[in-house]
Amino acid sequence: MYDLDQLRRNVRVMDLLTRSYEAHSRGDRAVFESAFGEAIEIMPRAIDNATRDAMASYGPDLWTEQGEWSAFGNKIASYLPAEIAKLDGSGSLQYFCGPGSTETRCAPFTFIVSSVRPVDTSIISAYNQQVTATYQQQAAAARLKAAEGVYGSDANYFLGMEDLVNTCQASHVECNIYVGNPPTHP
C-alpha cells in the first residue's frame, strides 16, 4: 500500500513523462527537455545510492583491483531499479529502463566502471608507499642474488663496500676506505 507522498510522486513522474512524450511527439524540444529533465532529476541520486550500496560489498582496495570493476558495475546496475523506486515511489512499475528497452520489455541498466578513486587521498599515498617499499625489497633481493653469484658467501661484504663508495660519491666527499689492514706509518 502506498502512502500519500508516494502516490503524489507517482502522479508527478507520470505527468512529467507524459508531458515529455507529448512534447516530443509535437516536436517541441524545449518543453520535452524541461519535462524529461525534471522526470530524471532523481537519477543522479539513485546512482549515488546504488553505488554506495554496491561499494559495501567490496574491500577498501577496489580502486587497485581493475579485474573487479566489471562486477562492481553489474552490482550497481542490479541495485539501481530499487533505488529509483525508492525515490520516485514507482514500486513495481518501472519508469526508467536501460538501453535496448522496448514498449514491452524494460532492459536492465548497464554500468561500465572505468575508474575508481578513493575519496581520501591518504589511502593513495599509503598504497604508493607500500608499493615502493615492495619494489625496493624486490630490487634489494635481486641485487643480493646477483652478488652471491659473483662473490659467494662474501656477497653482503662486497655490497656493503659498494654502498659505502656510492654514499661517499653521492655526498660529494672524499672518503678513505681501507680494505684489509690499514696502512701503517713509520
Image (cartoon, helix red, strand yellow):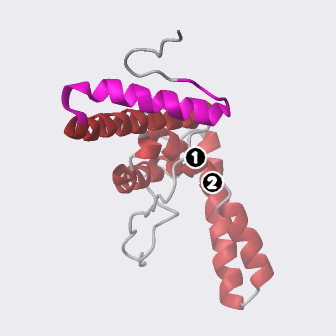
Determine which residue is flagged by label 2: 44
Q: Which picture quadrant has residue 145? A: top left
Spot occupied by residue 183 in the image (x, y as percentages of width and height): 47, 16
**SS of the residue under disc 2:** helix
- Density class for disc 2 (Cα within 10 Å; few <14, some 14-19, many ≥20) is few
Under mark 2, the amino acid is Pro
Q: Are marks 1 and 2 in contact (CB under 8 Å)?
A: yes
Q: Is residue 121 visible?
A: no
Q: Which residues are magenta?
A: 151-176
Tell me if 122 is positioned left or right of 134 in this view.
right
**Cα distance, mark 1 to mark 2?**
6 Å
**SS of the residue under disc 1:** helix
Determine which residue is flagged by label 1: 48
Does the magenta-highlighted stretch encompass residue 171?
yes
Which residue appears farthest toward the right when viewing the image? 30
Residue at horizontal 41 percent and vertical 39 percent from the top: 135
Which residue appears farthest toward the bottom when viewing the image? 27
Depicted 89 relative to depicted 133: above or below: below
